[in-house]
Image (tube, coloured by chain):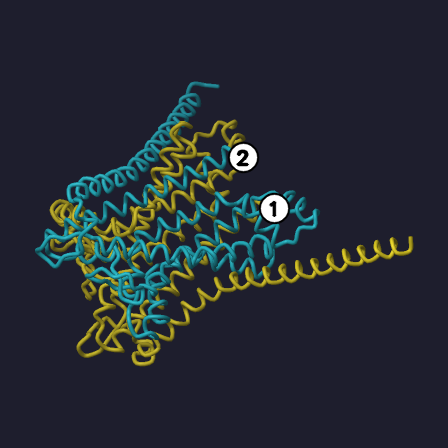
Protein backbone atom coordinates (compact mmCIF):
# COMPACT_ATOMS: atom_id res chain seq x y z
CA UNK A 1 0.00 0.00 0.00
CA UNK A 2 1.51 3.34 -0.96
CA UNK A 3 1.43 6.57 0.98
CA UNK A 4 -1.37 8.25 -0.98
CA UNK A 5 -4.00 5.54 -0.46
CA UNK A 6 -3.00 5.54 3.17
CA UNK A 7 -3.68 9.23 3.38
CA UNK A 8 -7.02 8.82 1.62
CA UNK A 9 -8.20 6.05 3.91
CA UNK A 10 -6.97 7.99 6.93
CA UNK A 11 -8.96 11.01 5.85
CA UNK A 12 -12.01 8.88 5.16
CA UNK A 13 -11.71 7.27 8.55
CA UNK A 14 -11.30 10.62 10.28
CA UNK A 15 -14.30 12.09 8.42
CA UNK A 16 -16.47 9.21 9.50
CA UNK A 17 -15.31 9.54 13.09
CA UNK A 18 -16.01 13.28 13.09
CA UNK A 19 -19.45 12.78 11.54
CA UNK A 20 -20.24 10.17 14.17
CA UNK A 21 -19.10 12.39 17.02
CA UNK A 22 -21.21 15.29 15.73
CA UNK A 23 -24.32 13.12 15.34
CA UNK A 24 -23.96 11.61 18.80
CA UNK A 25 -23.30 15.05 20.28
CA UNK A 26 -26.48 16.33 18.62
CA UNK A 27 -28.47 13.43 20.06
CA UNK A 28 -27.25 14.38 23.53
CA UNK A 29 -28.26 17.98 22.86
CA UNK A 30 -31.73 16.85 21.75
CA UNK A 31 -32.15 15.02 25.06
CA UNK A 32 -31.01 18.08 26.99
CA UNK A 33 -33.48 20.14 24.92
CA UNK A 34 -36.33 17.86 26.04
CA UNK A 35 -35.25 17.86 29.69
CA UNK A 36 -34.79 21.64 29.60
CA UNK A 37 -38.50 22.26 28.92
CA UNK A 38 -39.54 19.71 31.52
CA UNK A 39 -37.46 21.40 34.21
CA UNK A 40 -38.55 24.87 33.13
CA UNK A 41 -42.28 24.08 33.12
CA UNK A 42 -42.18 22.16 36.39
CA UNK A 43 -40.05 24.83 38.04
CA UNK A 44 -42.43 27.63 36.99
CA UNK A 45 -45.45 25.70 38.23
CA UNK A 46 -43.75 24.81 41.50
CA UNK A 47 -42.44 28.30 42.28
CA UNK A 48 -45.48 30.33 41.25
CA UNK A 49 -47.92 27.74 42.55
CA UNK A 50 -46.31 27.37 45.96
CA UNK A 51 -46.24 31.15 46.37
CA UNK A 52 -49.99 31.26 45.76
CA UNK A 53 -50.83 28.35 48.06
CA UNK A 54 -52.85 29.14 51.19
CA UNK A 55 -55.15 27.18 53.48
CA UNK A 56 -58.23 29.05 52.31
CA UNK A 57 -57.70 27.43 48.91
CA UNK A 58 -59.41 24.34 50.27
CA UNK A 59 -62.12 26.02 52.34
CA UNK A 60 -63.41 28.96 50.30
CA UNK A 61 -65.37 29.18 47.07
CA UNK A 62 -64.14 30.62 43.79
CA UNK A 63 -64.35 34.40 44.24
CA UNK A 64 -65.60 37.18 41.99
CA UNK A 65 -62.75 39.32 40.65
CA UNK A 66 -60.96 41.41 43.23
CA UNK A 67 -62.02 39.57 46.36
CA UNK A 68 -60.40 36.76 48.26
CA UNK A 69 -61.34 33.13 47.83
CA UNK A 70 -60.30 29.58 47.19
CA UNK A 71 -61.01 26.65 44.93
CA UNK A 72 -63.03 24.44 47.28
CA UNK A 73 -66.03 24.04 44.95
CA UNK A 74 -63.79 23.39 41.94
CA UNK A 75 -61.71 20.79 43.81
CA UNK A 76 -64.88 19.06 44.96
CA UNK A 77 -66.38 19.16 41.47
CA UNK A 78 -63.23 17.73 39.93
CA UNK A 79 -63.06 14.98 42.53
CA UNK A 80 -66.68 13.94 42.14
CA UNK A 81 -66.71 14.04 38.33
CA UNK A 82 -63.41 12.11 38.13
CA UNK A 83 -64.79 9.54 40.54
CA UNK A 84 -67.94 9.26 38.44
CA UNK A 85 -65.89 8.84 35.28
CA UNK A 86 -63.80 6.08 36.87
CA UNK A 87 -66.95 4.33 38.16
CA UNK A 88 -68.51 4.39 34.68
CA UNK A 89 -65.39 3.76 32.63
CA UNK A 90 -63.67 1.04 34.64
CA UNK A 91 -66.31 -1.75 34.59
CA UNK A 92 -67.08 -1.26 30.90
CA UNK A 93 -63.37 -1.00 30.11
CA UNK A 94 -62.45 -4.13 32.07
CA UNK A 95 -65.29 -6.06 30.44
CA UNK A 96 -64.33 -4.92 26.95
CA UNK A 97 -60.66 -5.72 27.65
CA UNK A 98 -61.71 -9.17 28.83
CA UNK A 99 -63.63 -9.69 25.61
CA UNK A 100 -60.58 -8.73 23.57
CA UNK A 101 -58.12 -10.90 25.48
CA UNK A 102 -60.27 -13.94 26.30
CA UNK A 103 -62.93 -14.21 23.62
CA UNK A 104 -61.67 -12.44 20.52
CA UNK A 105 -57.91 -12.54 20.70
CA UNK A 106 -57.36 -13.29 17.01
CA UNK A 107 -60.91 -12.66 15.82
CA UNK A 108 -61.50 -9.96 13.15
CA UNK A 109 -64.07 -8.21 15.37
CA UNK A 110 -61.52 -8.18 18.18
CA UNK A 111 -58.96 -6.67 15.85
CA UNK A 112 -61.46 -4.03 14.77
CA UNK A 113 -62.30 -3.14 18.37
CA UNK A 114 -58.61 -2.96 19.28
CA UNK A 115 -58.01 -0.66 16.31
CA UNK A 116 -60.91 1.63 17.19
CA UNK A 117 -59.87 1.64 20.84
CA UNK A 118 -56.35 2.77 19.95
CA UNK A 119 -57.81 5.62 17.93
CA UNK A 120 -60.13 6.56 20.78
CA UNK A 121 -57.03 6.58 23.00
CA UNK A 122 -55.43 9.45 21.09
CA UNK A 123 -58.57 11.13 19.71
CA UNK A 124 -58.81 14.84 20.52
CA UNK A 125 -60.60 15.17 23.85
CA UNK A 126 -62.53 18.24 22.72
CA UNK A 127 -64.27 16.06 20.15
CA UNK A 128 -65.47 13.74 22.93
CA UNK A 129 -66.84 16.82 24.68
CA UNK A 130 -68.80 17.77 21.58
CA UNK A 131 -70.12 14.21 21.37
CA UNK A 132 -71.44 14.29 24.93
CA UNK A 133 -72.80 17.78 24.34
CA UNK A 134 -74.98 16.64 21.44
CA UNK A 135 -75.88 13.41 23.23
CA UNK A 136 -76.66 14.64 26.75
CA UNK A 137 -76.58 18.41 27.14
CA UNK A 138 -78.68 19.13 24.09
CA UNK A 139 -81.28 16.46 24.78
CA UNK A 140 -81.56 17.27 28.49
CA UNK A 141 -81.47 20.99 27.78
CA UNK A 142 -78.85 22.02 30.36
CA UNK A 143 -75.22 21.57 31.33
CA UNK A 144 -74.62 19.10 34.15
CA UNK A 145 -72.06 17.28 36.24
CA UNK A 146 -73.37 14.02 34.79
CA UNK A 147 -72.43 15.14 31.30
CA UNK A 148 -68.99 16.13 32.56
CA UNK A 149 -68.44 12.76 34.22
CA UNK A 150 -69.63 10.98 31.08
CA UNK A 151 -67.23 12.85 28.80
CA UNK A 152 -64.36 12.04 31.18
CA UNK A 153 -65.50 8.40 31.24
CA UNK A 154 -65.00 8.29 27.47
CA UNK A 155 -61.35 9.17 28.11
CA UNK A 156 -61.00 6.58 30.88
CA UNK A 157 -62.55 3.81 28.77
CA UNK A 158 -59.85 3.26 26.11
CA UNK A 159 -57.03 3.42 28.69
CA UNK A 160 -58.65 0.71 30.82
CA UNK A 161 -59.56 -1.43 27.78
CA UNK A 162 -55.98 -1.35 26.55
CA UNK A 163 -54.32 -2.18 29.89
CA UNK A 164 -56.83 -4.93 30.73
CA UNK A 165 -56.35 -6.49 27.30
CA UNK A 166 -52.56 -6.38 27.58
CA UNK A 167 -52.42 -7.59 31.17
CA UNK A 168 -54.77 -10.54 30.53
CA UNK A 169 -52.71 -11.55 27.50
CA UNK A 170 -49.65 -11.69 29.78
CA UNK A 171 -51.30 -14.25 32.06
CA UNK A 172 -49.75 -17.63 31.12
CA UNK A 173 -52.20 -19.93 29.36
CA UNK A 174 -51.17 -22.80 31.66
CA UNK A 175 -53.08 -20.99 34.41
CA UNK A 176 -56.27 -20.96 32.31
CA UNK A 177 -55.80 -24.60 31.34
CA UNK A 178 -55.16 -25.72 34.90
CA UNK A 179 -58.31 -24.02 36.17
CA UNK A 180 -60.46 -25.19 33.24
CA UNK A 181 -59.27 -28.79 33.62
CA UNK A 182 -60.60 -28.78 37.19
CA UNK A 183 -64.01 -28.09 35.70
CA UNK A 184 -64.21 -24.45 36.71
CA UNK A 185 -66.54 -22.57 34.36
CA UNK A 186 -64.89 -19.91 32.26
CA UNK A 187 -66.47 -16.89 33.91
CA UNK A 188 -65.17 -18.11 37.26
CA UNK A 189 -61.72 -18.70 35.78
CA UNK A 190 -61.76 -15.13 34.51
CA UNK A 191 -63.07 -13.58 37.71
CA UNK A 192 -61.10 -15.57 40.26
CA UNK A 193 -57.89 -16.57 38.49
CA UNK A 194 -57.17 -14.22 35.61
CA UNK A 195 -58.32 -10.94 37.22
CA UNK A 196 -56.40 -11.77 40.38
CA UNK A 197 -53.24 -12.28 38.42
CA UNK A 198 -53.75 -9.21 36.23
CA UNK A 199 -54.98 -6.96 39.04
CA UNK A 200 -51.85 -4.81 39.58
CA UNK A 201 -51.73 -4.06 35.87
CA UNK A 202 -55.41 -3.15 35.69
CA UNK A 203 -55.10 -0.93 38.78
CA UNK A 204 -52.16 0.81 37.12
CA UNK A 205 -54.31 1.43 34.06
CA UNK A 206 -57.08 2.96 36.17
CA UNK A 207 -54.57 5.19 37.99
CA UNK A 208 -53.11 6.36 34.68
CA UNK A 209 -56.60 7.10 33.41
CA UNK A 210 -57.31 9.08 36.59
CA UNK A 211 -54.09 11.03 36.05
CA UNK A 212 -55.19 11.84 32.52
CA UNK A 213 -58.67 13.06 33.37
CA UNK A 214 -57.71 15.10 36.43
CA UNK A 215 -56.02 17.68 34.22
CA UNK A 216 -58.46 17.38 31.33
CA UNK A 217 -60.16 20.64 30.43
CA UNK A 218 -61.47 20.61 26.89
CA UNK A 219 -64.32 18.09 27.27
CA UNK A 220 -65.60 19.81 30.43
CA UNK A 221 -65.95 23.25 28.86
CA UNK A 222 -69.35 22.56 27.38
CA UNK A 223 -70.55 19.56 29.35
CA UNK A 224 -70.12 20.45 33.03
CA UNK A 225 -69.54 24.14 32.22
CA UNK A 226 -68.64 25.91 35.46
CA UNK A 227 -70.27 26.98 38.67
CA UNK A 228 -69.31 29.73 41.02
CA UNK A 229 -70.95 28.02 43.97
CA UNK A 230 -70.69 24.80 45.87
CA UNK A 231 -72.92 22.09 44.52
CA UNK A 232 -73.08 18.36 45.05
CA UNK A 233 -76.00 17.99 42.71
CA UNK A 234 -74.66 16.26 39.62
CA UNK A 235 -77.59 17.40 37.53
CA UNK A 236 -76.41 21.01 37.92
CA UNK A 237 -73.48 22.70 36.13
CA UNK A 238 -70.35 21.96 38.12
CA UNK A 239 -67.01 23.68 38.63
CA UNK A 240 -63.79 21.82 38.03
CA UNK A 241 -60.21 22.84 38.70
CA UNK A 242 -59.00 22.80 35.06
CA UNK A 243 -61.93 24.86 33.77
CA UNK A 244 -61.49 27.37 36.61
CA UNK A 245 -57.76 27.56 35.80
CA UNK A 246 -58.64 28.25 32.17
CA UNK A 247 -61.15 30.97 33.05
CA UNK A 248 -58.91 32.63 35.65
CA UNK A 249 -55.68 32.46 33.65
CA UNK A 250 -57.35 34.10 30.65
CA UNK A 251 -58.72 36.91 32.83
CA UNK A 252 -56.95 40.23 33.38
CA UNK A 253 -57.05 40.02 37.22
CA UNK A 254 -53.91 39.31 39.24
CA UNK A 255 -55.77 37.69 42.13
CA UNK A 256 -57.40 35.26 39.68
CA UNK A 257 -54.01 34.51 38.13
CA UNK A 258 -52.64 33.59 41.56
CA UNK A 259 -55.55 31.23 42.17
CA UNK A 260 -55.04 29.68 38.72
CA UNK A 261 -51.39 29.00 39.53
CA UNK A 262 -52.32 27.47 42.87
CA UNK A 263 -54.80 25.22 41.05
CA UNK A 264 -52.19 24.34 38.43
CA UNK A 265 -49.78 23.40 41.20
CA UNK A 266 -52.31 21.14 42.91
CA UNK A 267 -53.27 19.41 39.64
CA UNK A 268 -49.66 18.90 38.53
CA UNK A 269 -48.63 17.53 41.92
CA UNK A 270 -51.59 15.13 41.92
CA UNK A 271 -50.90 13.92 38.39
CA UNK A 272 -47.18 13.39 39.02
CA UNK A 273 -47.84 11.54 42.28
CA UNK A 274 -50.33 9.27 40.50
CA UNK A 275 -47.87 8.43 37.74
CA UNK A 276 -45.15 7.71 40.34
CA UNK A 277 -47.57 5.49 42.25
CA UNK A 278 -48.56 3.52 39.16
CA UNK A 279 -44.90 3.09 38.24
CA UNK A 280 -44.19 1.79 41.76
CA UNK A 281 -47.04 -0.74 41.52
CA UNK A 282 -45.74 -2.01 38.19
CA UNK A 283 -42.17 -2.28 39.49
CA UNK A 284 -43.20 -4.13 42.64
CA UNK A 285 -45.33 -6.48 40.60
CA UNK A 286 -42.45 -7.15 38.23
CA UNK A 287 -40.11 -7.81 41.16
CA UNK A 288 -42.52 -10.32 42.71
CA UNK A 289 -42.78 -12.19 39.42
CA UNK A 290 -39.04 -12.51 38.90
CA UNK B 1 -80.09 -55.19 50.93
CA UNK B 2 -82.56 -54.14 48.23
CA UNK B 3 -83.51 -51.09 50.25
CA UNK B 4 -79.84 -50.26 50.70
CA UNK B 5 -79.08 -50.45 46.97
CA UNK B 6 -82.10 -48.39 46.07
CA UNK B 7 -80.94 -45.76 48.58
CA UNK B 8 -77.56 -45.69 46.89
CA UNK B 9 -79.24 -45.40 43.51
CA UNK B 10 -81.34 -42.48 44.74
CA UNK B 11 -78.27 -40.76 46.12
CA UNK B 12 -76.40 -41.27 42.85
CA UNK B 13 -79.37 -40.08 40.81
CA UNK B 14 -79.70 -37.05 43.08
CA UNK B 15 -76.01 -36.34 42.64
CA UNK B 16 -76.29 -36.65 38.87
CA UNK B 17 -79.34 -34.39 38.78
CA UNK B 18 -77.50 -31.97 41.03
CA UNK B 19 -74.42 -32.03 38.78
CA UNK B 20 -76.60 -31.58 35.70
CA UNK B 21 -78.29 -28.66 37.31
CA UNK B 22 -74.93 -27.16 38.25
CA UNK B 23 -73.62 -27.70 34.75
CA UNK B 24 -76.67 -25.99 33.33
CA UNK B 25 -76.24 -23.12 35.77
CA UNK B 26 -72.57 -22.78 34.88
CA UNK B 27 -73.39 -22.83 31.19
CA UNK B 28 -76.00 -20.13 31.70
CA UNK B 29 -73.59 -18.03 33.75
CA UNK B 30 -70.90 -18.55 31.11
CA UNK B 31 -73.30 -17.44 28.42
CA UNK B 32 -74.33 -14.37 30.37
CA UNK B 33 -70.72 -13.47 31.10
CA UNK B 34 -69.78 -13.84 27.48
CA UNK B 35 -72.74 -11.70 26.49
CA UNK B 36 -71.76 -8.93 28.92
CA UNK B 37 -68.13 -8.70 27.83
CA UNK B 38 -69.11 -8.85 24.16
CA UNK B 39 -71.57 -6.02 24.68
CA UNK B 40 -68.81 -3.97 26.35
CA UNK B 41 -66.53 -4.64 23.40
CA UNK B 42 -69.19 -3.58 20.92
CA UNK B 43 -69.78 -0.49 23.07
CA UNK B 44 -66.23 0.68 22.29
CA UNK B 45 -66.98 0.41 18.57
CA UNK B 46 -70.26 2.25 19.03
CA UNK B 47 -68.62 5.02 21.05
CA UNK B 48 -66.39 6.00 18.15
CA UNK B 49 -69.13 5.62 15.53
CA UNK B 50 -71.53 7.52 17.80
CA UNK B 51 -69.06 10.37 18.20
CA UNK B 52 -68.68 10.69 14.43
CA UNK B 53 -72.40 10.44 13.69
CA UNK B 54 -73.49 12.80 16.45
CA UNK B 55 -71.14 15.47 15.17
CA UNK B 56 -72.24 14.95 11.60
CA UNK B 57 -75.82 15.33 12.86
CA UNK B 58 -74.96 18.40 14.93
CA UNK B 59 -73.11 20.00 12.04
CA UNK B 60 -75.69 19.18 9.36
CA UNK B 61 -77.17 22.67 9.45
CA UNK B 62 -73.79 24.25 8.73
CA UNK B 63 -72.97 21.74 6.00
CA UNK B 64 -76.33 22.16 4.27
CA UNK B 65 -76.30 25.97 4.56
CA UNK B 66 -72.77 26.62 3.40
CA UNK B 67 -72.11 23.47 1.38
CA UNK B 68 -68.55 22.85 0.24
CA UNK B 69 -67.89 26.56 0.58
CA UNK B 70 -67.68 25.95 4.33
CA UNK B 71 -64.25 24.44 3.75
CA UNK B 72 -62.91 27.27 1.61
CA UNK B 73 -64.44 30.42 3.07
CA UNK B 74 -62.36 32.62 5.37
CA UNK B 75 -65.38 34.42 6.70
CA UNK B 76 -66.32 34.01 10.38
CA UNK B 77 -69.07 36.46 11.07
CA UNK B 78 -71.25 35.70 14.08
CA UNK B 79 -73.46 38.74 13.50
CA UNK B 80 -74.43 38.00 9.92
CA UNK B 81 -74.31 34.23 10.43
CA UNK B 82 -71.65 33.54 7.83
CA UNK B 83 -69.16 30.87 8.75
CA UNK B 84 -66.22 29.34 6.90
CA UNK B 85 -63.63 26.92 8.18
CA UNK B 86 -60.56 27.89 6.19
CA UNK B 87 -58.88 30.04 8.86
CA UNK B 88 -59.10 27.42 11.64
CA UNK B 89 -58.13 24.63 9.23
CA UNK B 90 -55.11 26.63 8.07
CA UNK B 91 -54.12 27.42 11.67
CA UNK B 92 -54.45 23.79 12.72
CA UNK B 93 -52.30 22.55 9.85
CA UNK B 94 -49.63 25.25 10.18
CA UNK B 95 -49.18 24.90 13.95
CA UNK B 96 -49.05 21.10 13.63
CA UNK B 97 -46.50 21.41 10.82
CA UNK B 98 -44.25 23.71 12.89
CA UNK B 99 -44.55 21.28 15.78
CA UNK B 100 -43.52 18.36 13.55
CA UNK B 101 -40.55 20.24 12.06
CA UNK B 102 -39.19 20.77 15.58
CA UNK B 103 -40.35 17.59 17.28
CA UNK B 104 -39.34 14.94 14.75
CA UNK B 105 -35.56 15.59 14.70
CA UNK B 106 -35.47 16.20 18.45
CA UNK B 107 -37.40 13.00 19.17
CA UNK B 108 -35.11 11.06 16.87
CA UNK B 109 -32.12 12.49 18.74
CA UNK B 110 -33.62 11.52 22.09
CA UNK B 111 -34.41 7.99 20.89
CA UNK B 112 -30.90 7.64 19.49
CA UNK B 113 -29.37 8.92 22.71
CA UNK B 114 -31.45 6.60 24.88
CA UNK B 115 -30.85 3.46 22.82
CA UNK B 116 -27.27 3.79 21.56
CA UNK B 117 -25.38 6.59 23.26
CA UNK B 118 -26.28 6.95 26.93
CA UNK B 119 -24.62 4.70 29.49
CA UNK B 120 -26.97 2.05 30.83
CA UNK B 121 -27.54 3.63 34.24
CA UNK B 122 -28.73 6.82 32.57
CA UNK B 123 -31.29 5.31 30.16
CA UNK B 124 -34.01 4.48 32.70
CA UNK B 125 -34.16 7.78 34.60
CA UNK B 126 -33.73 10.03 31.54
CA UNK B 127 -36.33 8.06 29.59
CA UNK B 128 -38.75 8.32 32.52
CA UNK B 129 -38.14 12.07 32.78
CA UNK B 130 -38.90 12.60 29.10
CA UNK B 131 -42.08 10.56 29.50
CA UNK B 132 -43.03 12.73 32.46
CA UNK B 133 -43.37 15.53 29.93
CA UNK B 134 -46.30 13.58 28.43
CA UNK B 135 -47.99 13.37 31.83
CA UNK B 136 -48.18 17.13 32.45
CA UNK B 137 -51.76 18.26 31.74
CA UNK B 138 -52.12 20.39 28.62
CA UNK B 139 -53.63 23.26 30.59
CA UNK B 140 -50.32 23.60 32.45
CA UNK B 141 -48.52 23.93 29.11
CA UNK B 142 -51.06 26.58 28.18
CA UNK B 143 -50.56 28.60 31.36
CA UNK B 144 -46.82 28.33 31.22
CA UNK B 145 -46.94 29.31 27.56
CA UNK B 146 -49.10 32.36 28.24
CA UNK B 147 -47.33 33.70 31.33
CA UNK B 148 -43.71 32.65 30.77
CA UNK B 149 -43.06 31.77 27.17
CA UNK B 150 -45.18 34.38 25.35
CA UNK B 151 -43.42 37.38 27.00
CA UNK B 152 -40.03 35.92 26.07
CA UNK B 153 -41.15 35.34 22.49
CA UNK B 154 -42.50 38.89 22.26
CA UNK B 155 -39.49 40.54 23.82
CA UNK B 156 -36.57 38.63 22.34
CA UNK B 157 -37.45 36.06 19.71
CA UNK B 158 -39.91 37.95 17.49
CA UNK B 159 -37.75 41.11 17.16
CA UNK B 160 -34.71 38.95 16.44
CA UNK B 161 -36.60 37.01 13.76
CA UNK B 162 -37.86 40.28 12.27
CA UNK B 163 -34.36 41.74 12.08
CA UNK B 164 -32.45 38.72 10.88
CA UNK B 165 -34.79 36.48 8.92
CA UNK B 166 -37.58 38.92 8.00
CA UNK B 167 -35.42 40.52 5.30
CA UNK B 168 -34.66 37.24 3.52
CA UNK B 169 -36.46 36.50 0.27
CA UNK B 170 -39.11 33.73 0.19
CA UNK B 171 -39.19 32.83 3.89
CA UNK B 172 -38.91 36.46 5.03
CA UNK B 173 -42.66 37.22 5.10
CA UNK B 174 -43.19 34.22 7.40
CA UNK B 175 -41.13 35.88 10.10
CA UNK B 176 -42.21 39.51 9.93
CA UNK B 177 -44.82 40.83 12.28
CA UNK B 178 -45.44 42.74 15.47
CA UNK B 179 -43.71 41.42 18.61
CA UNK B 180 -46.93 40.16 20.20
CA UNK B 181 -45.49 36.94 21.53
CA UNK B 182 -48.71 35.02 20.83
CA UNK B 183 -49.19 33.51 17.40
CA UNK B 184 -48.68 30.50 15.19
CA UNK B 185 -44.96 30.10 15.88
CA UNK B 186 -45.41 30.18 19.66
CA UNK B 187 -48.27 27.67 19.43
CA UNK B 188 -46.19 25.42 17.18
CA UNK B 189 -43.26 25.44 19.61
CA UNK B 190 -45.48 24.63 22.61
CA UNK B 191 -47.11 21.82 20.59
CA UNK B 192 -43.67 20.50 19.70
CA UNK B 193 -42.72 20.24 23.38
CA UNK B 194 -45.97 18.38 24.02
CA UNK B 195 -45.58 15.76 21.28
CA UNK B 196 -41.84 15.10 21.73
CA UNK B 197 -42.41 12.52 24.49
CA UNK B 198 -44.98 10.63 22.36
CA UNK B 199 -42.82 10.41 19.25
CA UNK B 200 -39.58 9.71 21.08
CA UNK B 201 -41.07 6.91 23.19
CA UNK B 202 -42.43 5.15 20.08
CA UNK B 203 -39.07 5.55 18.32
CA UNK B 204 -37.20 4.28 21.34
CA UNK B 205 -39.44 1.24 21.62
CA UNK B 206 -39.12 0.28 17.96
CA UNK B 207 -35.36 0.89 17.90
CA UNK B 208 -35.08 -1.70 20.66
CA UNK B 209 -36.81 -4.31 18.46
CA UNK B 210 -33.93 -4.35 15.96
CA UNK B 211 -32.14 -7.70 16.36
CA UNK B 212 -28.78 -7.27 18.10
CA UNK B 213 -27.26 -9.65 15.53
CA UNK B 214 -27.90 -7.16 12.73
CA UNK B 215 -26.36 -4.28 14.62
CA UNK B 216 -23.38 -6.31 15.79
CA UNK B 217 -22.67 -7.48 12.25
CA UNK B 218 -22.52 -3.87 11.12
CA UNK B 219 -20.30 -2.89 14.05
CA UNK B 220 -18.02 -5.83 13.30
CA UNK B 221 -17.58 -4.51 9.75
CA UNK B 222 -16.31 -1.28 11.27
CA UNK B 223 -19.43 0.91 11.11
CA UNK B 224 -19.72 3.87 13.44
CA UNK B 225 -22.76 4.21 15.71
CA UNK B 226 -24.25 6.82 13.38
CA UNK B 227 -23.87 4.54 10.39
CA UNK B 228 -25.45 1.63 12.24
CA UNK B 229 -28.46 3.74 13.19
CA UNK B 230 -28.80 5.33 9.76
CA UNK B 231 -28.21 2.25 7.60
CA UNK B 232 -29.43 -0.64 9.80
CA UNK B 233 -31.80 0.56 12.52
CA UNK B 234 -33.77 3.14 10.52
CA UNK B 235 -34.43 1.00 7.42
CA UNK B 236 -35.49 -1.89 9.66
CA UNK B 237 -37.96 0.24 11.63
CA UNK B 238 -38.97 2.71 8.91
CA UNK B 239 -42.71 2.09 8.86
CA UNK B 240 -43.01 2.12 12.65
CA UNK B 241 -40.98 5.33 12.91
CA UNK B 242 -43.34 6.99 10.44
CA UNK B 243 -46.23 5.56 12.45
CA UNK B 244 -44.82 7.18 15.60
CA UNK B 245 -44.52 10.51 13.78
CA UNK B 246 -48.14 10.26 12.64
CA UNK B 247 -49.19 9.48 16.19
CA UNK B 248 -47.54 12.71 17.28
CA UNK B 249 -49.17 14.54 14.37
CA UNK B 250 -52.59 13.28 15.47
CA UNK B 251 -51.94 14.65 18.95
CA UNK B 252 -50.73 17.99 17.61
CA UNK B 253 -53.77 18.42 15.36
CA UNK B 254 -56.28 17.83 18.14
CA UNK B 255 -54.53 19.53 21.05
CA UNK B 256 -56.81 22.14 22.50
CA UNK B 257 -55.92 23.90 25.72
CA UNK B 258 -52.24 24.70 25.17
CA UNK B 259 -53.00 26.14 21.75
CA UNK B 260 -56.01 28.12 22.94
CA UNK B 261 -53.84 30.01 25.42
CA UNK B 262 -51.09 31.09 23.04
CA UNK B 263 -52.68 31.30 19.59
CA UNK B 264 -54.60 34.53 20.06
CA UNK B 265 -58.06 33.58 18.75
CA UNK B 266 -58.00 35.82 15.66
CA UNK B 267 -60.00 34.90 12.58
CA UNK B 268 -57.62 36.14 9.95
CA UNK B 269 -55.49 34.53 7.32
CA UNK B 270 -51.92 35.84 7.35
CA UNK B 271 -48.67 34.60 5.92
CA UNK B 272 -46.76 35.66 9.01
CA UNK B 273 -46.16 33.05 11.68
CA UNK B 274 -45.79 35.79 14.27
CA UNK B 275 -49.41 36.89 13.89
CA UNK B 276 -52.23 35.49 16.01
CA UNK B 277 -54.44 32.94 14.32
CA UNK B 278 -56.88 30.23 15.24
CA UNK B 279 -57.11 26.47 15.16
CA UNK B 280 -60.15 24.21 14.98
CA UNK B 281 -59.85 23.03 18.56
CA UNK B 282 -59.12 26.52 19.91
CA UNK B 283 -62.09 28.01 18.05
CA UNK B 284 -64.43 25.43 19.56
CA UNK B 285 -63.00 25.88 23.06
CA UNK B 286 -63.20 29.66 22.92
CA UNK B 287 -66.54 30.17 21.28
CA UNK B 288 -68.80 27.22 21.93
CA UNK B 289 -70.41 28.46 25.12
CA UNK B 290 -70.81 31.93 23.60
CA UNK B 291 -72.48 30.69 20.43
CA UNK B 292 -75.83 32.46 20.42
CA UNK B 293 -77.46 31.04 17.31
CA UNK B 294 -78.14 27.53 16.07
CA UNK B 295 -76.14 28.02 12.90
CA UNK B 296 -73.16 29.31 14.94
CA UNK B 297 -73.24 26.25 17.20
CA UNK B 298 -73.78 23.98 14.24
CA UNK B 299 -70.76 25.48 12.45
CA UNK B 300 -68.61 24.82 15.52
CA UNK B 301 -69.79 21.20 15.71
CA UNK B 302 -69.11 20.88 11.97
CA UNK B 303 -65.55 22.08 12.69
CA UNK B 304 -65.31 19.37 15.34
CA UNK B 305 -66.47 16.82 12.78
CA UNK B 306 -63.73 17.91 10.34
CA UNK B 307 -61.11 17.66 13.10
CA UNK B 308 -62.39 14.22 14.02
CA UNK B 309 -62.21 12.94 10.44
CA UNK B 310 -58.69 14.30 9.89
CA UNK B 311 -57.30 12.91 13.15
CA UNK B 312 -59.09 9.61 12.52
CA UNK B 313 -57.24 9.11 9.24
CA UNK B 314 -53.91 10.29 10.63
CA UNK B 315 -54.18 7.99 13.65
CA UNK B 316 -55.44 5.08 11.53
CA UNK B 317 -52.43 5.47 9.23
CA UNK B 318 -50.18 5.57 12.31
CA UNK B 319 -51.71 2.35 13.66
CA UNK B 320 -51.37 0.54 10.34
CA UNK B 321 -47.72 1.49 10.01
CA UNK B 322 -46.93 0.54 13.59
CA UNK B 323 -48.69 -2.77 13.08
CA UNK B 324 -46.53 -3.57 10.07
CA UNK B 325 -43.41 -3.77 12.23
CA UNK B 326 -45.06 -5.93 14.88
CA UNK B 327 -46.30 -8.30 12.13
CA UNK B 328 -42.78 -8.54 10.80
CA UNK B 329 -41.60 -9.20 14.35
CA UNK B 330 -44.24 -11.88 14.85
CA UNK B 331 -43.41 -13.63 11.57
CA UNK B 332 -39.86 -14.38 12.64
Chain identity of mark 1: B
Secondary element under disc 1, as helix, strand or loop, is: helix
Residue A233 spot, x, y in % from top left: 29, 64
Q: Please indicate whether residue B169 sits to the left or right of residue A287 in the image.
A: left
**Residue at horizontal 41 percent and vertical 72 percent from the top:** B53
Secondary element under disc 2, as helix, strand or loop, is: helix
Badge 2 is on which residue? A289
Q: Is residue B288 in view from this perspective?
A: yes
**Residue at horizontal 49 percent and vertical 32 percent from the top:** A287
Residue B149 spot, x, y in % from top left: 18, 47
Asked if labels 1 and 2 share a chain, the reply is no
Q: Name the colour assigned to chain B in the rendering.
A: yellow
Residue B26 spot, x, y in % from top left: 66, 58
**The disc label shown at residue B331, or none:** 1
Residue situated furthest left in the rendering: A66
| Chain rendered cyan | A
Residue situated furthest bottom in the rendering: B65
The residue closer to the viewer here, B310 or B13, is B13
Chain identity of mark 2: A
Q: Please indicate whether residue B317 sits to the left or right of residue A177 in the image.
A: left
Amino acid sequence: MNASTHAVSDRLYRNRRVKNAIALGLSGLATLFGLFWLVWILWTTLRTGLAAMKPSLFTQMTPPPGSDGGLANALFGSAIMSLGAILIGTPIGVAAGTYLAEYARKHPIGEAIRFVNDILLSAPSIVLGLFVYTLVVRTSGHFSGYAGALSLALIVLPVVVRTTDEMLQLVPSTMREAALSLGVPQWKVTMQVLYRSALPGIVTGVLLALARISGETAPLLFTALNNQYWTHDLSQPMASVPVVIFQYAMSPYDSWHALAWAGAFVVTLFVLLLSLLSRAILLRNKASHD
Amino acid sequence: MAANSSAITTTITAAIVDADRRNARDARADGAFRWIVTAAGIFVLLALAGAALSMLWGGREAFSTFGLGFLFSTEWDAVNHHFGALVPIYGTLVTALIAMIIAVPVSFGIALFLTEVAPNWMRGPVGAAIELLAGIPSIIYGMWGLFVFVPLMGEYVSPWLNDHIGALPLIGPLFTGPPLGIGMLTAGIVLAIMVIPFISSVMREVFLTVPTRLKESAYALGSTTTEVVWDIVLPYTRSAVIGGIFLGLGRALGETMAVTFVLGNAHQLTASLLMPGNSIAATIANEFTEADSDIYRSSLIALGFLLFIVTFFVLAAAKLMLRRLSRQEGAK
